[in-house]
Image (cartoon, helix red, strand yellow):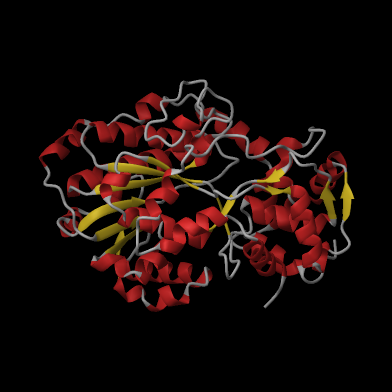
Amino acid sequence: TELGLPLDHAIALLMDGQTTLAEASALMNSEVRNQKDKIGDAVDVDKDIELDDEMDNWKGVPRCDAKGVLVTGASGFVGGHVVAELLRGAAAGGPIVCVLREHTVKGAKKKLELSLHKLGLEEAVASCAGVECLLGNLSHNRLGLSSEDTEGLRGRIGTVLHLAAKVDLAASYRAHRSANVTGTREACRLAGMLGARLLHVSTTDVLPRVARLGYEEVEVFDLNLSAEEAPDDKHGYARSKWAAERVVVTARRRGLRCSILRLGMVAGHSATGICVARDWVPRLFVGIAHAQAFPCADERHTLPHSVPVDVVAQAVVALMQADEAAVDGQGITVASCAGLIQMQELHRQLVAFGGPYAGMRLVPFPEWIQKVKDDAALSAWPIFNWAEHQPEFPVFNSRPLFAPAPIGPRVLQAVSSCPAAAEGLTRGLSGSALRAMLRHLLLTL
């Protein structure tokens, strides 16, 4: 298909990091991948979440309230913005230590700088000299840190901020287990050895779609889900994050100071629009542009709740810097508190944006889904293949995310260093942030 400008820029973003079109098509084919992964479905999750006897020794470790923070996942989309936010505030005076998987410390620093540059965070790149990089591996003991590096952190690190995770919505629990479950256990081990507290970043995907949980029981540390309520084997990523939460709950019972922050869907930067093109919402925007058609929808149909990544980073850092008594032992949702964006409103905004959306047709959902299926890897098909046989656009945002009085905004309002975070969560994905994402995705510089 001859796409021409401005879609060639969007396609370049979609294909970034994919060496061939065949690889992108393979990413789309979740059925094949899930069949392969089912070889490992007989995994004992209960065994995965057990803590060994060494992790009983935390009780004798002196508590460390130092200002320093150790970050995992610093080279990722959210992690990079969190590092930038920490640098902006100079981590309240303490060292910023990032654990990265690389061969040399110099290579790790270069990896971090390149990641920040790709995210448009040039101010953070310029300040990167103030970040300490250590070599590690999520699936290894103490996150792969050497004994010497671990001892060097003692008395300097008061918070372990565990952001690192594998995210592949088409892959099985087994494919996520090493990074997400073992990695969380080792983050707990390291925090416990240092006398530090752990802020574990999870996802609202762990929350059951249909369950007994009401609004009063959602923002809790221990969700205490039954086997029927927990994410199942069809949702490998969510299942692995649920198992990781079980690890953190068990670690707290053994004396670890810890909190869980559950992130909702993360959108592009509110000003630059820079985003991960293969994520759900950006992929939908590109897919609609490519299809030159928009699915018919009514007031029940809404865009999944999203929050700009810079707002998420502000919120995570502010919650880390909040009074520990307000967050310790809490399960806090970090997601949009704004009203839902109806698909009809999204259609209006896209048409007003113009460009590839100017002449798009409104078509029934079955016709639209068939079109995106035919367009394959360069469309919205990878995120909608599960809805192929539905008669209408799926209904999203059906599960409760917050307590009646959401904890996050309430705690954030008390953090004088970051008043914008609570405001940003309340604003959600604003019209200006949405347009910034469209400009990033669809317009060449």
> Could you say which quadrant of the image residue 277 lies in?
bottom right
Asked whether, in this view, residue 97 is left or right of residue 364, the answer is left
**In the image: residue 139, left or right of residue 227:** left
User: At 54% across and 27% down in the image, what residue appears?
Assistant: 232
| 156 shown above or below 240 | below
Q: Quadrant of residue 132?
A: bottom left
Measured as percent of width and height from the top left, residue 386 is found at 71, 36
Q: Quadrant of the C terminus?
A: bottom right
Q: Is residue 64 visible?
A: yes
Q: Is residue 136 visible?
A: no
Question: Is 359 or 26 nearer to us in this picture?
Answer: 359
Q: Position of residue 303 (x, y in %)?
A: 68, 47
**Which residue sits at x=42%, y=71%?**
113
Q: What residue appears at the point 63 percent right and 35 percent down from the top-left corner?
A: 398
* Quadrant of the image containing the N terminus: bottom right
User: Where does residue 185 sit, x and y in percent of width and height?
Assistant: 32, 39
Where is residue 348 shown, x and y percent of the image?
79, 57
